[in-house]
Image (cartoon, rainbow, N blue to C red):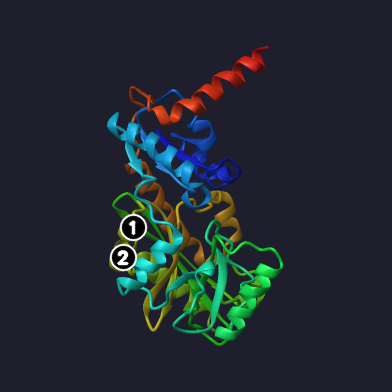
Amino acid sequence: MINFVTTRSHAYTVRHLVRQLGDARRWSYERLFRQKELRAGTWVFTDHERLSPFEIALAAKVANKLEQGGSRVLNHPARVRGRHDLLKALHEAGINQFSVWRCESQPRPNSFPVFIRNEFDHLSSDFDLIADQQALDATIARMKGNGVPLAGKLVIEYAGQEVSPGVWQRFATYRVDARLIAHHNAVDFRWAAKDVEDKKRLLAHPMFDAFVETERRFVADNLYEDVLRQAFDLAGIDYGRADFSLVDGRPQIFEINTNPAHGSHRTIYRETFPARVETQRLSEDRLYAALRAIDMPIGAGIALDDPALRTQQVFRRLFLGLKRA
């Protein structure tokens, strides 16, 4: 049984994954913290950036108990780096050319343009590029004046490169325990590349066949595996998806998402371009094979008897008592 633990409002991301795997289950952190006992199996912790430090500490307590009880634990909450620390580490390791600063630290980036994003979500559209230090200072001052907290906001140096005039790409590689799976390559007319909105425009692009072939080679040959493995190891992430672009042929990793959204196979194969379907089947087959390889049978009960969890468990008993009344 593979157990995916997400925040309650982001459980939808693994809904199709759980259904298509069959031997899998979704848990919210809120529900997890109220259990007095869990069964041994494979446990995958996700959504770390959406948890408070208090919740991270509780999740780590649960993960410790699960490991001690013989479970396989992926993404142990005590070992996963946050976005700021990971981007710093990737820059210091020489993987990323760009770096990151916290908004409240009077940031002085080394290069421009830069953009500002949240540390606690995965929104990746409509980022405004900020041209220079004066404009950055003005933007931060305006945020403060408008009552926008600087805490949780990151200033990140832009590191992108067009693959054709006005066209950018984003690669995605999954990790499942020891396996890395090159999964897809999104091509877009926005620098913060996601799934393209103007599909007719992309289909008519003179380089469309070249884009399809780039993705095919990326997936078939599992390109950039060595550098991606180093990045996942630095992140302390055993399960997730690294999103990156190429600058002068070098991967530039802008995030590793521990709770990437999975679509249903029916939707993926119906809505993707026909020329990409074979490649997508290959990457999905490899991803699901890797997930099934980490599955463990349901094991014995594991008591969650850590003192830090008792308050949550008491709340559960109180809630059930009120419900019966």
Q: Nearer the viewer, residue 31 or 60?
A: 60
Figure check: 54 above or below 86: above
Residue 258 horizontal side relative to residue 68, left or right? right
Q: Position of residue 266 (x, y in %)?
A: 57, 50
The residue indicated by pointer 2 is 225
- Which amino acid is tagged 1? Leu
Q: How many marks?
A: 2
Question: Is disc 2 placed on a helix, strand or loop?
Answer: helix
Question: How far apart, in angstroms, are the residues tagged by discs 1 and 2?
Answer: 7 Å
The residue indicated by pointer 1 is 180
Q: Which mark is residue 23?
A: none
Residue 237 is at least partly visible in this image: yes
Residue 219 horizontal side relative to residue 316, left or right? left
- Which amino acid is tagged 2? Glu
* Disc 2 residue crowd, few under 14, some 14–19, many 20+, Cα 10 Å: some
| Residue at the (45%, 61%) spot, across then down | 83
Q: Quadrant of residue 93?
A: bottom left
Figure check: 315 above or below 120: above
Q: Position of residue 322 (x, y in %)?
A: 65, 17
Residue, far top: 325
Residue 129 is at least partly visible in this image: no
Q: Nearer the viewer, residue 80 or 311?
A: 311
Figure check: 288 above or below 160: above
| Residue at the (48%, 32%) spot, across then down | 32
Residue 178 horizontal side relative to residue 97, left or right? left
Q: Position of residue 162 (x, y in %)?
A: 51, 83
Dots 1, 2 in contact, CB < 8 A: yes
Which quarter of the rendering shows the C terminus? Answer: top right
Q: Nearer the viewer, residue 122 or 33?
A: 33
